[in-house]
Amino acid sequence: MKRIFLSPPHMSGKEQEYINEVFKSNYIAPLGEFVDRFEQSVCDFTGSSYALATINATAAIHLALRVLNIIKDDLVLCSSFTFIGSVSPVLYQNAEVFFIDSEKETWNLSPKLLEDAIEKASKRPKALILTHLYGQCADLEKIVAICKKHKIYLIEDAAESLGATFQGKQSGTFGDMGVYSFNGNKILSTSGGGMLVSDNEAWIEKARFYATQAKEDAPYYEHKELGYNYRMSNVLAAIGVAQMEVLQKRVDKCKEIFLWYQEELNEIEEIRFMPEVKESEGNRWLTTLSLCKTDPKKVIEHLQKNNIESRLLWKPMHLQELFESSSKALNGVSEELFTQGLCLPSGTQLSRKDVGLICQYIKEVLA
Ligand SMILES: Cc1ncc(COP(=O)(O)O)c(C=O)c1O
């Protein structure tokens, strides 16, 4: 029986050809034509003015914090319902995290709790790292307004939401800086990779400098600041260029898969699919849902027995031992979703028949 994975890579067919070009040119380096082309293709698609390709999205978030001068003891607000890579860069900077819970309406960061947290905080927060969960946008209108009002930098963690829009504009382009991920399970994959975007050229150039070991412009190796080795290789960028050519196709297919699941499971009362904030179109990177009665682990086990991969939703960051002492503004929403929610296989090579089969197994458990 073939295994159905949660979200495996899906190549366009052009990747090998572009990699061959890289080999012919011998630019097997974190530099080269394909890195420039990959960065340009992300700018063209998202409408962002400047981009920097990085080894992964976690590194891109770290660079954003460095460029925005987030330093020791600074306070950074973060979505709690997210993946660790969104938050660990705050610790790399020895800054402090303040977690904000989700709202029921979007499963994403609650604007109301954000306001409360800013008022309650012991010092003025310098930045917010906002995750667009599972490819669905947070309520950007309210959140951008709050950040502007309080002069807080907004870093959008759009690792999962490449291709999602809010009021017709791409996620990742609302904040001061935005980040996309191209790791193995994202809507596009370069095996590993990330992209930092911004409309501020100086910030992207500063990030490029930090990502290149902070090497000063000199005919020898001169260093005045701490840097990192965070640039993407030309080989992986070649994969990225080929992947970007099919981004819209992949987004359309993820949305179609979501509709298939809805069609199949709509009559089951206890199921709630992840909602979508008004005026937004998520990329539905993963189809996710919550169950009011059945333990989702039972569904996961039954799917697993049938060689199908599914997962619980993220365990909120405020529940992680690592962040025991961090500040938090909570309302119970992400904790409840963690105990009730499920990510279903959403790879863009799934057929209608595959989804029918997966839903048959789900119905066997929920019946
Ligand atoms: C919300 C979120 N933020 C950050 C990351 C980190 O991305 P990367 O694995 O490219 O470092 C991921 C996924 O891996 C993610 O899902």
Image: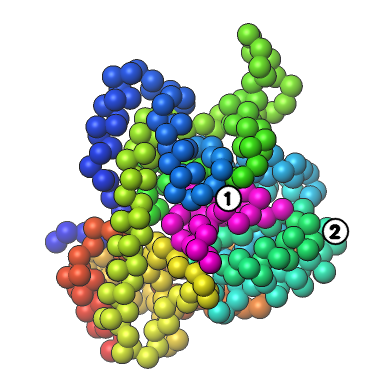
Q: Residue at the far right: name it.
A: 122
Q: For the residue labelled by badge 1, is the local secondary structure a helix, a strand or a loop?
A: strand
Mark 1: amino acid: Gly
Is the distance from the Cβ of mark 1 to the nearest ligand 1 atom less than 8 Å? no
Q: Earlier in the sequence, mark 1 or mark 2?
A: 2
Quadrant hosting residue 196: top right
Q: For the residue labelled by badge 2, is the local secondary structure a helix, a strand or a loop?
A: loop
Residue occupied by mark 2: 123
Q: Quadrant of the N terminus?
A: bottom left
Label 1 – label 2 distance at C-alpha = 25 Å
Quadrant hosting residue 131: bottom right
Q: Position of residue 164 (x, y in %)?
A: 46, 61
Observer-nearest of 203 and 81: 203
Q: Please report the residue visible at 42 percent of the width from the left and 34 percent of the height from the top.
A: 37
Observer-nearest of 149 and 56: 149
Checking the image for residue 129, the label placed there is none
Tell me if mark 1 has few (under 14), some (14-19) or many (20+) residues whose alpha carbon lies within 10 angstroms of its own.
many
Q: Is residue 162 left or right of residue 330?
A: left
Q: Please report the residue visible at 73 percent of the width from the left and 66 percent of the height from the top.
A: 146
Do we see residue 135 in this rendering? no
Q: Please report the residue visible at 46 percent of the width from the left and 26 percent of the height from the top.
A: 30
The stretch in magenta equals 153-181
Q: Is residue 285 left or right of residue 332?
A: left
Labelled pair 1, 2 in contact (Cβ < 8 Å): no
Residue 211: in magenta span = no
Q: Residue at the far top: name it.
A: 219
Mark 2: amino acid: Lys
Q: Is residue 350 left or right of residue 90?
A: left
Residue occupied by mark 1: 178
Q: Position of residue 351 (x, y in %)?
A: 20, 65
Q: Position of residue 70 (x, y in %)?
A: 74, 45
